[in-house]
Image (cartoon, coloured by chain):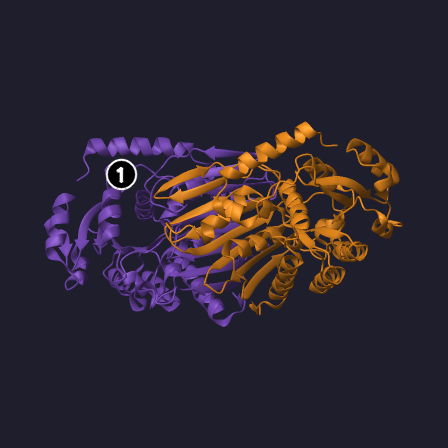
Chain colours: A purple, B orange
Amino acid sequence: MISRRSFLHTAGSTLAAASLASPRADAQVPAIKLLPGKQIGFALVGLGNLSINQLMPAFAQCRRAKLVGLVSGRPEKAKQLAQLYGVDPKNIYSYDNYDRIADNPAIDVIYVVLPNSMHAEYTVRALKAGKHVLCEKPMATTAEDCERMIAAAKAANRKLMVDYRVRYEPFNQALIAYARETTEAGPTRLILADAGFNIGDPTQWRLRKPMAGGGSLMDIGIYALNAARYLTGEEPVAVNAMMHSTPNDPRFSEVEENIMFQLRFPSGILANCGSSYGGGVNRHRVVKQRGAAELEPASSYTGLRMRVWRGGNIEERVLPQRNHFTGSMDHFADCIINDTAPLTPGEEGLKDMRIIAAIYEAARSARTVALS
Amino acid sequence: MISRRSFLHTAGSTLAAASLASPRADAQVPAIKLLPGKQIGFALVGLGNLSINQLMPAFAQCRRAKLVGLVSGRPEKAKQLAQLYGVDPKNIYSYDNYDRIADNPAIDVIYVVLPNSMHAEYTVRALKAGKHVLCEKPMATTAEDCERMIAAAKAANRKLMVDYRVRYEPFNQALIAYARETTEAGPTRLILADAGFNIGDPTQWRLRKPMAGGGSLMDIGIYALNAARYLTGEEPVAVNAMMHSTPNDPRFSEVEENIMFQLRFPSGILANCGSSYGGGVNRHRVVKQRGAAELEPASSYTGLRMRVWRGGNIEERVLPQRNHFTGSMDHFADCIINDTAPLTPGEEGLKDMRIIAAIYEAARSARTVALS
């Protein structure tokens, strides 16, 4: 449970940090109207690594989002975690009684943290239960599922947001400002964005096509794709791609290891992007006419760094290190309190999913695929 | 003129520096047999910026290559430069009496530093005059010209080398060793290589298609392409590309500004590469299974840096800063003295030229182009 004291302390330091960020950062994430005491109750669906190691601790720093419920197929695990995080045991659900969350007024938001292929079903059911939904990326495994989720949100008159967490932290916000607003270095010419790591356990669901929907692109390359889109502020009109998986590597019997893709944007900006489950790379670079800026790492949970090439020098830009999930969850809570649209709604997830399908098609067909 | 004292000093410091480089570096550039007093006479053809600001000063540090002749259409300029660099005035030629170099035994090597479209003609004529030829990159503007140059070298029984200068300096040599020989980080998965700058004067020959043969790819992107090949030690089997030039920018009325290209290598390594005349980027990165290494800058004349990602840390690797042209010119001089094959012969230039043609074709046709 968040104590009053720790809540105030956290709020204070977060606000101080935010004031160091670029004007763009503030412009992108609507300013929070401090409503004393008002908090939004979140229930986590799926208690895997991400929930346990990232999301639950992130609530401790939230000003508006509060962990109040858990949904899990493992009652003992759920009970222990509930105790650890001060979650009322009566707000623990299983997959069997999931839909009864409809009757629980303490839960405002369902945060879907399940394997990709289950996002659509559990999102739609949560919306039907009258709850708002925050969904992990990728939003689903097909564009059709994304459309179904968006339609369900509309029908239920509830909000749907995809948790593109790096949109809610200062480094990527500062790089957006550099790419789209800074004029001193001239227009942006090229975007270079790569995301990858050497994936471990060959038995994990991320490597099973039916559950993951795809390989590195679906899981981690989506950061590079999303970055190319938010750094340009444009939608790509054409994609190229090349794909490769190490033969006989048991990790890649169903999904791709590496996929490199190129995007053409309407303004003429070209983006060269990479996605890997075979090696580590984690970087967003913006190349302008008379300068450049880079985040590296760019999408890690912590320790992001920003360098700016300016007048022959390389400057390190010091920005506040914020918990990305704290930022995204508080943002969604604010959207609910103020009835505003989230920065990364379901439509944002759908756009990525359509481009991901085009990237796979480009790799398979060995030709440039046009996007409408 | 190189004094005995400065020559010895330079030789000593170069050898000391070389001993700090990786074993691969030594393996690639054959060790020099010190033959006291023996030097190879070079004549520069074309007295533009590269000759004046880079090549002439580079001779001061050479152990084997010596500037002995100049060829220029501007006699006053040639005379002044000859005086400055201790070149005998009787070794100054114009384009009218160029072929009479055949009668000058002081000149062993013609270094062709003319606009790209003139490389073939002046190389073939030099070979017919019985001289060895060192040719600037790109080797020519078409693969057919490259083939003609190679045939002329064979017919004349003379050596032909393309001055891919970064092959002759320690940083790129160390990155080759990392990519191809280091085993601790596992196999190489991805190559990222980019080269670009914001080009100035719109009237320069590099922006005229007939003289340059192409735009940024021909001039600077060739560094990224060549790096992808020497870092893998393989020849690409397929290419993708996207191209863009800013409309109405007078610099790009004839040649391309930006071109991003992807290469697939037989081992499965994918390379994502970029080339730009619109913004600065200069970097070679090797992504392995459990580590990575990067040069940035990677192909500047000076100030190269190397970083290695290893066990969660980033280590800066300190290597000797050597003059690239000193390395390449001395290497060619050694090849002539010892009758050995240069590391970057005409065949190397031809390979790049064929791939460059395929990259342009891929960009134009919007499909993957296979290379045989």
Q: Please, is residue A47 above or below residue B52 in the view?
A: below
- The foreground one among A353 and B48 is B48
Q: Residue furthest bottom?
A: A365
Q: Residue furthest front?
A: B36
Quarter in which the C terminus of chain B is drawn: bottom right
The residue shown at (78%, 40%) is B68
How far across and how far down the image is residue A273, in percent?
48, 55
Residue A190 in sight here: no
- The foreground one among A336 and A199 is A199
Residue A34 in sight here: yes
Report the number of numbered marks: 1
Badge 1 crowding class, 10 Å Cα cut-off, few under 14, some 14 to 19, many 20 or more, is many
Q: Please, is residue A20 above or below residue A166 in the view?
A: above
- The foreground one among B28 and B50 is B28
What's the chain of the residue with tag 1? A
| Residue type indicated by callout 1 | Gln
Give the residue pinned by disc 1: A61
How far across and how far down the image is residue A314, in percent?
52, 35
The answer to whether B80 appears left or right of B189 in the picture is right
The answer to whether A282 appears left or right of A79 in the picture is right
Which quadrant would residue B369 be assigned to in this image? bottom right
Question: Which SS class for mark 1?
Answer: loop
The answer to whether A164 appears left or right of A22 in the picture is left
How far across and how far down the image is residue B48, in percent?
76, 42
The residue shown at (46%, 36%) is A22
How far across and how far down the image is residue B299, in percent?
59, 44
Q: Residue furthest top?
A: B5
Quarter in which the N terminus of chain B is drawn: top right
